[in-house]
Amino acid sequence: MHFSGEPRETHGIVEQMIRLPPKPRIVAGVLFFGAGTAATIGLWGKGVLWGLTIFMVVVGFLLTLSGISGLFRERHRREFLTSVEEHREEILGAMMEAKRQSRNPIRFLNEKGIHDAEIRGALLEEMNRRLQ
């Protein structure tokens, strides 16, 4: 909040672009990069180089890279979810056995490399439901 008591608007266009899903982020990045490059080339011959055009090129490049890495992360997460679903009964059985032996089922999930909060929550809910 600033002195007038109203919240300050801090969400610029770049911040909004970063929050996009990966595919639209790639598209936005390519558009920013293309527009910035075209404007820079167009102004270059006139002896003018604006900071905004260079900024658009850099932001476009970074948005594109960010979108590509987001696609890889999404693909990796989908593969991991598939793997967990294939072994769900086995994992739940081991978790229930750990719980019966007064061991922490979260530690078991850590040992198996399951760190995703959504997956853990679903597995813990299912385990608790079955143990009741």
Image (tube, rainbow, N blue to C red):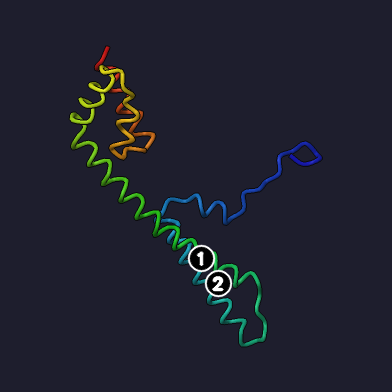
| Left or right of 108 in this view: 34 | right
In the image, 74 versus 6, the foreground residue is: 74
Q: Secondary structure at mark 1?
A: helix
Q: Amino acid at mark 2?
A: Gly
Toward the right, the furthest residue is 3
**Which residue sits at x=60%, y=68%?**
55
Q: Residue at x 28, y 17 (%)?
A: 129
Residue 107: where, in percent of width, then height? 34, 30
Measured as percent of width and height from the top left, residue 123 is found at 30, 28
Q: How many marks?
A: 2
Query: Label 2 belongs to which residue?
Result: 36
Rounded to the nearest whole Å, what is the CA distance between mark 2 and mark 1?
Answer: 8 Å
* The quadrant where residue 23 appears: bottom left
**Which quarter of the figure is the C terminus placed in?**
top left
> Secondary structure under badge 2?
helix
Circle 2/circle 1 CB separation < 8 Å: yes
Which one is in front, 63 or 115?
A: 115
| Relative height, residue 76 to residue 101 (above, below) | below
Q: Which part of the image, by quadrant, shows the N terminus?
A: top right
Counting from the top left corner in percent of width and height, residue 130 is at 24, 17
Q: Residue at x 65, y 79 (%)?
A: 49
Q: Residue at left 80%, top 39%?
A: 4
Instruction: Report the amino acid beneath label 1.
Output: Gly
Q: Which residue is mark 1?
A: 60
Please determine whether, in this image, residue 80 is positioned above or below residue 47. Answer: above
Q: Earlier in the sequence, mark 2 or mark 1?
A: 2
Q: Which sits in the foreground, 127 or 11?
A: 127
Q: Quadrant of residue 94?
A: top left
Query: Label 2: few (<14), some or many (≥20) within 10 Å?
Result: many
| Label placed on residue 71 | none
Task: Residue 84 in the image: state x and y as whole percent.
Answer: 24, 37
